[in-house]
Image (cartoon, helix red, strand yellow):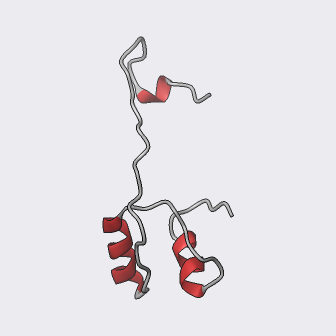
Amino acid sequence: MEFTDYVQPNNVVESGELDANYFQHLPYLEDFNEQNNTHLVSVSAVHVEPMGIYGGKQATLDAIKAK
């Protein structure tokens, strides 16, 4: 399933509609549980995809066009 926010994936797992999700790091999960009185647990560490922004001819991030 695809979601357009970071709250719904945890809500559908908490409700039992889905078995798991894969998008967050442990501090976010712990904060989500505390803020929403949920009981989700981590079963594995989530790797972070590498991202980089490199200097070039653009003066602002707004000038970079998405491909």
Q: Relative to 34, is 57 above or below?
A: above
Outermost residue to the right:
1
Residue at 42% across / 71% down in the picture? 43
Q: Relative to 18, is 28 above or below?
A: above
- How far across and how far down the image is residue 7, in percent? 51, 70
Residue at 37% across / 21% down in the picture? 54
In the image, 4: left or right of 58? right
Quadrant of the rendered image containing residue 34: bottom left
In the depicted view, which residue is nearer to us: 66 or 13?
Answer: 13
Quadrant of the rendered image containing residue 25: bottom left
The image quadrant where one finds the C terminus is: top right
- How far across and how far down the image is residue 19, in percent? 60, 77
Residue at 33% across / 74% down in the picture? 31
- How far across and how far down the image is residue 53, in percent? 39, 27
In the depicted view, which residue is nearer to us: 63 or 33?
Answer: 33
Outermost residue to the top:
57
- How far across and how far down the image is residue 14, in percent? 53, 83
Residue at 51% across / 62% down in the picture? 22
Outermost residue to the front:
44
